[in-house]
Amino acid sequence: MASSTSKIVQESLEALLDDKSFLPELTGKTREKAFTSLVSILSTPNHVNKSFLRIALENGKVTRVPSFRVQHNNILGPYKGGIRFHESVNEDEVANLASLMTLKNALHEVPFGGGKGGVVINPRDYSDKELYMICKKYVQYFSEILGPDKDIPAPDVGTGDREMDWMMGEYKSIRPGSSYRGSFTGKSVINGGSLGRREATGKGVYFTFRYMLHNFVKDQKKWLSERKNIFAGTALDHMDKTLSLAFQGFGNVGSVAALEAFQCNHLNNKIVAVSDRNVTLYNSDGLDIPGLVKFTSSSGGDLPVDEEQLKEAEVKATIKDRDDVLSLNVDVLFLVALENQVYQENMKQVKANIIVEGANAPVTSGADKYLSEKGVIIVPDILANAGGVIVSYFEWLQGRETQFFTEEEVFKRLFDKMKETFDTIFPQFFGDPFPLRQNCYIHAVMKISTILYKQGKLY
Ligand code: NAD
């Protein structure tokens, strides 16, 4: 497990070791031994699988593409996690993301373990036919370890329903007669995917923020007055005031979350900035998010990059540098692009009082410590971006039963499930001084540790 996640897991275990009400049957030396086992189990993946996929390119050349499938832990159920196509994919990153999946599933009571996959390519450099071959080969090389009751991949950065459809098709060819619908999630609806899966993560990200502010912070008079020096004069001190929001990342998750914020009736939101891999767009009066969503649906996903494209999109905005989004004077910053976006060198420029992690691990552990100590509320990835894996779980269930939920049912079940987690985590957070991330980790680690203990694995 990469250092950032393993450090917080270790701190959570230390807190639990001292909490005698947790697993009280474990005492003295036996307790110490059990906790040593827990540290070693949670800080290392069960399996790291690596292959070099051999791909015949359309130009006649043959290339070998490094690819991974890391299986972190399956005590709660089959391994589950996306497959990322990106040029920066590496073993440490995939292992860290796999461990986050273990924690995320435990936190939200999803009966899966944690896994993650990655292929070291920039998908924009490959033709559709070549991408199809990469998907096929990935399944061929890892077919022994994948399956509906073993390890169930899903889309991540650079992959989507098209890739999951191709992969499930290959899995079905390799294992004729076996149950295959639950082998991959995030498939197209016609191919057994769930309605609402595409929007699930983005909707869940915004719902986490909305539920926290609308249902909790608003009524936390004592909590807020104790933090007068942090929140005085900001919109958090006057919940009836308009909240200014900025979004880093406008892809599958970011665009849906921004649209939810734009359409929200519960809070007075004004989305003043959105960014992507090329630019930041800024408008102090608020951006036309539906207009930008419409533009990106026909631009291959990118936001307008110049005046001509802004005119085409009929959107009023100032074009700023890509990374300017991080240092704007806003109430809330949604990080919905990639990991390690707020780090040692730029953390002091962040002015937002609330950060919502839609992406996985967008704030490094050093920046997390610095900002949390300053009083910034950081809503962590494992809490906020679980919508995708929760609806993936519904997809897996629907595939097993070959009975499908309506879109309305999917979102109701999604929000109900997330609410159950919030109703455990938020009262604890607003009642005690632990940062939200540590609260979430402790909760997840408690669940995993208890099951490991009950199954006799802590020796
Ligand atoms: P995506 O590829 O659809 O979108 C990524 C967005 O980030 C794009 O707008 C891209 O232009 C932008 N971007 C890339 N580099 C950037 C940079 N340096 N600065 C600013 N913007 C940049 O990916 P996605 O599916 O929206 O996933 C985004 C994040 O959410 C990832 O961290 C992913 O792991 C995480 N996540 C996704 C899901 C899911 O269901 N898709 C679920 C959980 C977590």
Image (cartoon, rainbow, N blue to C red):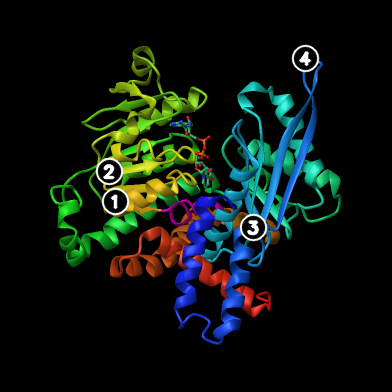
Q: CA distance from mark 1 to mark 2?
A: 7 Å
Residue 250 pos. (x, y %): 43, 34
Left or right side of 18 for 93: right
Q: Marks 4 and 3: which is nearer the front? A: 3
Query: Which residue is label 3 attached to?
Result: 44
Q: Is residue 445 above or below residue 126?
A: below
Q: SS for tag 3? A: loop
Q: Marks 1 and 3: which is nearer the front? A: 3
Left or right side of 33 for 421: left
- Amino acid bearing label 2: Ala
Q: Which mark is residue 352?
A: 2
Residue sitting at 37 percent across and 60 percent down? Answer: 436
Q: Marks 2 and 4: which is nearer the front? A: 2
Say if mark 1 contacts mark 2, CB within 8 Å.
Answer: yes
Residue placed furthest toward the top? 308
Q: CA distance from mark 4 to mark 3?
A: 41 Å
| Residue 409 visible in rendering | no
Within the magenta stretch, is there residue 316? no
Q: Marks 3 and 2: which is nearer the front? A: 3
Query: Which residue is label 4 attached to?
Result: 59
Query: Which residue is label 1 attached to?
Result: 376
Of label 1 and label 2, which has the lower sequence position?
2
Residue placed furthest toward the front? 29
Range shown magenta: 380-389
Q: CA distance from mark 2 to mark 4?
A: 49 Å
Magenta: main secondary structure equals: helix
In the image, is the residue at mark 3 within 8 Å of ligand 1 by its beta carbon? no
